[in-house]
Image (spheres, helix red, strand yellow):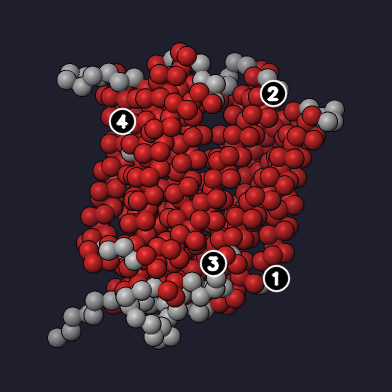
Amino acid sequence: MPSTPPPHSQHHVRHAKLTEGPILRSLLTLAVPLILANVLQAAYQLIDAFWVGRLGGNAVAAVSVSFPVMFLSISLGLGFAVSGSILIAQYFGAKDHEKVDHVAAQTILMIVLISIFLGIIGYALSPIFLNSLGVAPEVYGGALSFMRVSFIGLIFNFVFFMFQSVLRGVGEVKIPVYIVLGTVILNFGLDPLFIYGWGPIPASGVAGAAIATVGTQSIAAILGIIILLGGKYSVRLHWHDLRPDFAYIKRAFFLGFPASIEQSARALGLIVMTYLITSFGTVSMAAYGVGSNILQVVMIPAMGLSMAIATLVGQNIGARNMERAARIAWLGSAAGFIALEAFGILVFFTAAALVQFFVPSDQRVIDAGAIFLRIIAFSWGFIGLQFCLTAVFRASGNMVMTMMLTLISQWVLQFPIAYILSKHTAMGIDGIWWSVPIANVVMGIIVVLIYMKGDWKKKRLIESPQEDQLSSQTYQEVMVDDPSRG
């Protein structure tokens, strides 16, 4: 009669899937569900835009003007979710399941505290944010109510992001897809209910879209916590692990802070680029808006592949399998370059038709949007290189490196080049468009050179159970290197 398998035998099976066997299969096993999850997350925004759009231009403007502020707030928390995911991946690769559970609990605790702080600050300062953006009086009321409801629900948003990051760290990526799919379908039904009202439910207008989204996100967050408490998917939350471990929290904070700065820099970059483009008129802004939407769709597979690479490399670094980690990096980055370059070639030859799909009746926008897409399309392969190789740096714990690369890309290259070419040459708006491929190609080359130098192989955030002789009461070993050195 076969004996009952030990508690961690399932952990070992899942561990072997990602640290052994064909690399391409491991990449696809992780990347495909992650891409689907990103597609569904994008559907959230499309559904809100669909229903809010039926309220008129002021309602659309109210949501649009709130987006940069909310994106910035969420970006601040995402960095800490990234740090938790990388630590979990390395501990899981090292087969140290007790610390996987401990890190998951402590990171969720830290994320909850950060989200409560940001939610309170954001709610209180919402009027100041809107006034500083110069929001028109007819838009102000809807934008304020939408933004404040969104800040109230920030905790649910953060908790679900952390749930996704925890499961991604141990290689379990399908469950979040099912949850997001269910909440997207639910959101599609709840949006009109809260926006327009029905029976005892009053019509809340623009705020109704935020209420529906917060409601579905709260369900997703609660389901995530229940799943983690159940411990079925390679990680289990224990109540005793939720007691604040300030040694770990301090280390994790310094690990995650650069990633938060990196994400926030991207959010601020959107605001600065938008400000620069608006000086060239409505047609240019519309062309940028349509082109950016198309680019965001193209970026979804790149983001999924990047997350998959970070998980695989992190687990293999934890398992001290550096040769396999390097093979994953090269195969993944080659796949990212080829896939995005192929998308770019396709978009180059279909640019006008793609823009016309979104703006069928304005030939000026169609022409301007097609020019924008054709200028930037051939550099997309270098974006794929950046996403995939910076995922390797992040997986090894080089958060400061990835932060610096983002800051250089946007604030040293793209924005200065955009300003100089558009304002101080005869190129005009085309100068802004050309700043994008110039920055993409230069940064793609820089990232490859940094990767080939190989310093990322010397970085490891954890000690294996055999090496770790310290007390389990504290987790001073979370970072072997000083975090400030990146």
Distance of mark 1 from mark 4, alpha carbons? Answer: 49 Å
Image location of residue 88, percent across then percent down: 40, 67
Distance of mark 3 from mark 2, alpha carbons? Answer: 41 Å
Q: Who comes first in sequence, dot 1 or dot 4?
A: 4
369 sits left or right of 220 in the view: right
In contact (CB < 8 Å): disc 4 and disc 3: no
Residue of label 4: 211
Distance of mark 2 from mark 1, alpha carbons? Answer: 42 Å
Which quarter of the image is occupied by the N terminus?
A: bottom left
Say which residue appears at 45% left-offset and 13% top-offset.
138
Q: Who comes first in sequence, dot 4 or dot 3?
A: 4
Q: Secondary structure at mark 2?
A: loop
Q: Who comes first in sequence, dot 4 or dot 2?
A: 4
Residue of label 3: 483
One can see residue 336 in this view: no
Q: Nearer the viewer, mark 1 or mark 3?
A: 3
Residue of label 1: 453
Q: Who comes first in sequence, dot 2 or dot 1?
A: 2
Residue of label 2: 279
Q: Nearer the viewer, mark 3 or mark 2?
A: 3
Say which residue appears at 63% left-offset and 34% top-offset.
272
**Which amino acid does the dot numbered 2 rest on?**
Ser
Q: Nearer the viewer, mark 4 or mark 3?
A: 3
Image location of residue 106, percent across then percent down: 34, 62
Image location of residue 294, percent across then percent down: 58, 36
Task: Using the rendered view, name the quadrant where residue 466 is placed.
Answer: bottom left
